[in-house]
Image: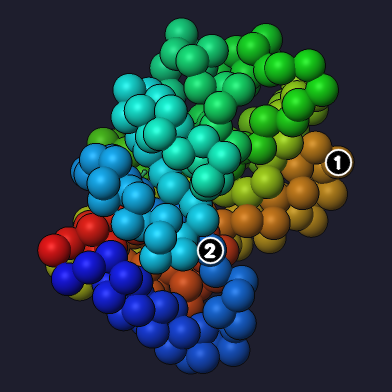
Amino acid sequence: MSVEENLQQVNQVIQSACEKVGRKKEEVTIVAVTKYVGNDKTKEVLEAGIKHIGENRVEGALEKWEAFQGQANFHFIGTLQSRKVKQVIDKYDYFHSLDRPSLAKEFQKRCPEGKKIRCFVQVNVSGEASKFGLAPEETIPFIESLKDYPAIEVIGLMTMAPFEEDPEKTRPVFRGLRELRDEVQSQRFPHAPCTELSMGMSNDYHIAVEEGATIVRLGSVLMNE
Ligand SMILES: *Cc1c(COP(=O)(O)O)cnc(C)c1O
C-alpha cells in the first residue's frame, strides 16, 4: 500500500483511540520514522501530508536533512553519542533521547548562539536491560540538574516499550511515563515545561494514544508496501 493509504488507516486508529478516552485527535502528532527507507519513500511521506520525520542514526539523519531541509521538522530519536552532537545540533529540531549529563553538557557546548535545544528526556520505564534511558526515580533529579544548561528546554518525556505480541501489555509502561510527566510538570521547573509524551511505535501506538501520547513515532506501519 502507499504511504497515503497507510496513513489513512493510522489516522483512523488514532481517531478511535482518542474517542475511547475523550481526547482530541489534534493532540497527537505523527513522527514518520524514515530510518528504513530512502529519499523516494520519504518524499512520499511528506507528500502524504506528514510534517515531522524521525531518524535514529547520524548518517541517515544528515542524508534526510540534506534532501528535505525546509520541508519538514526533524526529530533525532535514537541514542546520540556525544562526539556526534556537533553534526546534527544545528540541523535537527527535536532530540528525543537525552539520558545523561555528558550529553546535556555537549548540547550546551555546541548549541548555536541564541538557540534552544528542544529535548525529551528518555526514561526506561520498563526496566528492560536492553533499553536506554533513565530509571524513573532518577528522572526528576536529572531534569532538575538541567537548569545548569540554559540551552536545554525539556519539552517532554520519551520511552520505548518492550516489544510485546500483545500490545495491551505495554499499557503500564505508557501509563507510567504519563504519571512521571505529570509529576515533572508539578515541579514547575522553568526550563522543563514537559508537556509532551513521545511514546508508541507501530506495534503499540493505539495503546500509547489511549494513555496520553502526544507524539507517536511510526516506521513500519507507514512504510509497509
Ligand atoms: C525505529 C524506531 C521507531 C519506529 O519503529 P516502528 O516499529 O517501525 O514503528 C520508533 N522509535 C525509535 C526510537 C526507533 O528507533
Report the residue at 46% width, 8% height from top. Answer: 83
Amino acid on which the number 2 mark rests in the picture:
Thr
Judged left or right of residue 204, residue 224 is left
Q: Name the mark nearer the viewer: 2 or 1.
A: 2
Residue 128 is at least partly visible in this image: no
Asked whether residue 52 appears in the rendered view, the answer is yes
Residue 143's tag is none
Badge 2, how many Cα within 10 Å: few under 14, some, many 20+? some
Numbered mark located on residue 29 in the image: 2
Camera-side residue: 3 or 108? 3
Q: Give the distance between the C-alpha atoms of the residues marked 2 and 1, in whole angstroms.
A: 24 Å
Mark 1, ligand 1, within 8 Å: the answer is no
**In the image, residue 55 lies at what x, y percent?**
38, 38
User: The C terminus is located in which quarter?
Assistant: bottom left
Q: Helix, strand, or loop for circle 1?
A: loop
The residue identified by callout 1 is 190
Q: Amino acid at mark 1?
A: Pro
Residue 202, position in %: x, y? 28, 63
Q: Is mark 2 within 8 Å of ligand 1?
A: no
User: Badge 1: how crowded within 10 Å, few (<14), some, or many (20+)?
Assistant: few
Which numbered disc flags the more N-terminal residue, 2 or 1?
Answer: 2
Residue at x 64%, y 12% (from the top left corner)? 110
For residue 173, side relative to residue 22 (left or right): left
131 with respect to 24 (left or right)? left
Rendered-image quadrant of the N terminus:
bottom left
In the image, 77 versus 148, the foreground residue is: 77
Q: Name the secondary structure under disc 2.
A: strand
Task: Identify the residue at horizontal 44%, vertical 48% (top origin).
Answer: 53
Q: How many marks?
A: 2
Q: Where is 76 relative to 178, above or below?
A: above
